[in-house]
Image (cartoon, rainbow, N blue to C red):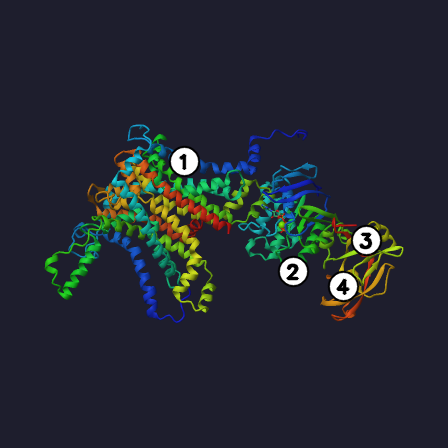
Amino acid sequence: MNAMVGETYFRRLVVFYIPLFLFVFAMLFPFAWMLITSIKPDAELYNPRISPFIVREPTLEHWESLFGTTLFIRWAVNTLWVAIASTAVSLFAGVLAGYALSRLVFRGSTMFGIMIFVTYLVPPTLLFIPLTGVVTWMGLQDTTWSLIFTYPTFLVPFCTWLLMGYFQTIPKELEECARIDGATRLQAMSKIVLPLAVPGILSAGIFAFTLSWNEFLYALVFIHSPETKTIPVGVTSELIKGDVFFWGALMAGALFGSVPVAIVYSFFVEHYVSGMTGAVKG
Amino acid sequence: MAQILLKNLRKTYDETEAVRGINLDIDHNEFVVLVGPSGCGKTTTLRMIAGLEEITGGEIFIGERLINNVPPRDRDIAMVFQNYALYPHMTVEQNMSFGLRLRKVAKAEIERRVKHAADILNIGELLERRPKQLSGGQRQRVAMGRAIVRNPEAFLFDEPLSNLDAKLRVQMRTEIKKIHQRVQTTVVYVTHDQVEAMTLADRIVVMNHGIIEQVGSPQEMYEAPKTRFVAGFIGSPAMNFVPCRIVERGAALGVRLSGDITLDLSAEQSKRYRGYLDKEMVFGIRPEHITERRQHTNENQLDFGCTVEVLEPMGIDTMVFMDIEGVEVTARAAPKAVSNPGETMMFTIDMNNTHLIDPKTDKVV
Amino acid sequence: MQTQQTAPEPSLRERLVTALENQRVLGYVLMAPALLLILIFIAYPFVLGVWMSLTDKIVGTSGTFIGLGNYDKLFASDIFLTAAWNTVFFTTIATIFKAVLGMWLAVLLNRKFRFANITRATVLLPFIVPTVLSTLAWLWMFDATFSVFNWTLRWLWQMEIGIFGLVLKENWGFFRGPLWLGDPSLAMASVILVNVWRGLPFFAISFLAGLQTIPPDLYDAADIDGASGWKKFWHVTLPLIKPVAIVVIVFSIVVTFADFQLVYILTRGGPNNETHLLATLAYQLGMGSGNIGQGAAVALFMLPILAFVIIFQLWYLRREGVR
Ligand SMILES: Nc1ncnc2c1ncn2[C@@H]1O[C@H](COP(=O)(O)OP(=O)(O)OP(=O)(O)O)[C@@H](O)[C@H]1O
Ligand SMILES: [Mg+2]
């Protein structure tokens, strides 16, 4: 909306700046709280009488214990590996399926399209119990492979759906021209359509990466050994012993576990947002 | 370079019959233009020749080869699309060499052919640019360059000029003709612009509702249309069609257009139209064959008078609109000779260039 | 050189290339990886889940068929009925808040101001970081003893006493503040709060994308017609972003309805199993107590509502597509 003509500064303050500030503050406060908690010594953390907003003697002890005495680094490596591998698997399957559904005419293509759309909306919580059986049956339980193969269940429909939309924006004639020029269908796809779809593929990839970095339920259910866990599961299960919460280390881990997605995201905000709105437009 | 033969070619989409049995024999190095109104199946036909559309029925030969099931890449043809379809992520040079690179042609040979094509088309300076950095006319040239480089058996064009502005369109039209003369090759060219068809074609194919109405040289199409549709489609402004009745005029026959106007037919025409005596027919004549009253140059010219309704000056000529029994008829007269609207004006009509159409079959008799 | 009399038998490679030129063949080939993944990891588990829900399987046994026994038991169980009700309540209230606040935020972000881009980017943070991790921060902020919210309330309370010297001081002694996660209603409210916090950015940014597709001249036209800000919102903005809004809301309903992480981290279903959602109850039954048959039945219980939502969405998309 255009700034309204003749809007007074006071009015703008009340209807715009203050609400916006409150929104931004609310959105960011928990992260600030993670940071403050992670650098506050235990003596200050667990003293309800002093202001929790002030850090009197900043300390890195929680960070040290997080990296030194827990398997956090291991979890980070696992998470990264799972996210990259499952994103690669999903992009591979999603690009091919998205291409087929948006470009090729074959029996059942409409049905496949609906099927993909429906699975896109099937949440992991619906299937995790029988999936545990499947994973065990395949001998994958307690390995990162169990995640690399199951994450695509929600990533592939998503990538396919998003890329279908993207492929449709690339003129068909380009491919037809390539095929007349001497390309096979596969060459037309790999040399013409895919290079042009790079922004879409990138969006889908970023989105898939953050989704698998964030996944919790499957990792919680399929993985038991501490050294195989991902960050979300490791932090919640290994840093909380019964009723004892190591809040300093927990918050350090939470903050650190959020950083990679935030960085990936900040580099590709545009792609991310377009991916998200693309996914929404469906 | 090769003959193209279409035998009873058909294409059906789910419900629509886009092409309903086309037979066409295209000669070596011939420039054939498919023309017809929107939706008549021109593009579909072209795409079937290219292999982009599956063939519902019939056969296509290129050269001696039946190519119904040959994929586009093995048909050895090139196609220029309406929106040019230049690959946006490649430079002009890469666009042009794409087909050759796929076929693993030697590098030196690729360079030679690209340079040759670029010389023909005058796009030598553009080779490093991307399609986005080109004007419409330049894109058009690159699209043709991409086709020329391949040195294919045949060129297919689908309305290549329709995205250009009027002036550039005329210029590129001439250019295409020049290029065809230089790069001798078989061309199938689709357009719905009959002027383009007339100026470019060795032979014109007029299509309507998925069938071919008539095939012939531009001159034949103009002088001897076989159906009412072709008669109306070719030529601009369009031919006048006036309902009429064939009547006896002494020994010969005449065409009665209205109570006032009856035109005598020549002895030869009378003989030809004898079978239609007293029948309701449609009389067709092009505006350029109705002029202001002139000195007769052959004995089949007649004079008649009619009230002028509207004038449309076009510069060299003025279009004169009149009303004959509720039907609008257009004449083409010298600007100095026209009367004002409302006044009666005398015209000369050249009966050698008239056509009689049977309204039951819409065929020219 | 060989004479070209007989065409040589096409090699395997050539035959493959020819086969893949056929779009019917190629279509299936390209679909294969995705279909395989879906079949093995969605379709098969789905069937397996339906079967499990009809058995009395517990961990380590193969279970016997008991028909609808699990469902009978569930309907007789207060915990299940509470969880089902909670799920509906949670989804409804959270979605309403997200939609309304998200729209508000989107309208704010759609104005021109300095740092607009960076503001838009930071506002999205809650949505992209791992939910479990940010929820841990909330868990800490809701802590019974060390809650920062309660400290702030207390501080305001004391400031009031300091300023006004209120008499109530004696009676109240040391103000503790609410037990955010200890009381069932308050716990549910807290869970909803965190869900709104997390999902709001998604709504806001999607709505913002929708708002930006509205041509400004429509507003100019409305200005000329003398429409007020609210009127413009009702009659111009809202109808135009309805398609985006519906897709976003449906998507969010599905995700919220199946939410697991918030309750798992914040309350584990407590106190006294009052805040369970279907997903957490399924987990507790299936994984916690090893009662796999019942867990599967609870999880499957989400299906009818999700199916309804999905069908609505398909219907809507098709209708929009036809238009
Ligand atoms: N992919 C398709 N699916 C269904 N019908 C189609 C398809 N392509 C074309 N048609 C139909 O086939 C008929 C012929 O279409 P075609 O594109 O060949 O016309 P055209 O002569 O090229 O017209 P224009 O001058 O408008 O380009 C039309 O009625 C069109 O609606
Ligand atoms: Mg066409």
How many angstroms separate mark 4 from mark 3 (CA)? 30 Å
**Callout 3–callout 2 Cβ contact below 8 Å:** no
How many angstroms separate mark 3 from mark 1 (CA)? 78 Å
Q: Quadrant of residue B173?
A: bottom right
The image shows residue A269 at horizontal and vertical percentages of 40, 53
How many angstroms separate mark 1 from mark 2 (CA)? 58 Å
How many angstroms separate mark 2 from mark 4 (CA)? 24 Å
The image shows residue B44 at horizontal and vertical percentages of 63, 45
- In the rendered structure, which amino acid carries the disc numbered 2? Ala
Residue B26 relative to residue C13: left or right: right
Tag 2 residue: B166
The vertical placement of C77 against C62, above or below, is below
> In the structure shown, which secondary structural element does the residue marked by tag 1 occupy?
helix
Residue behind label 2 places its C-beta within 8 angstroms of ligand 1: no
The image shows residue B316 at horizontal and vertical percentages of 75, 66
How many angstroms separate mark 4 from mark 1 (CA)? 75 Å
Q: Nearer the viewer, residue C125 or A65?
A: C125
- In the rendered structure, which amino acid carries the disc numbered 4? Arg
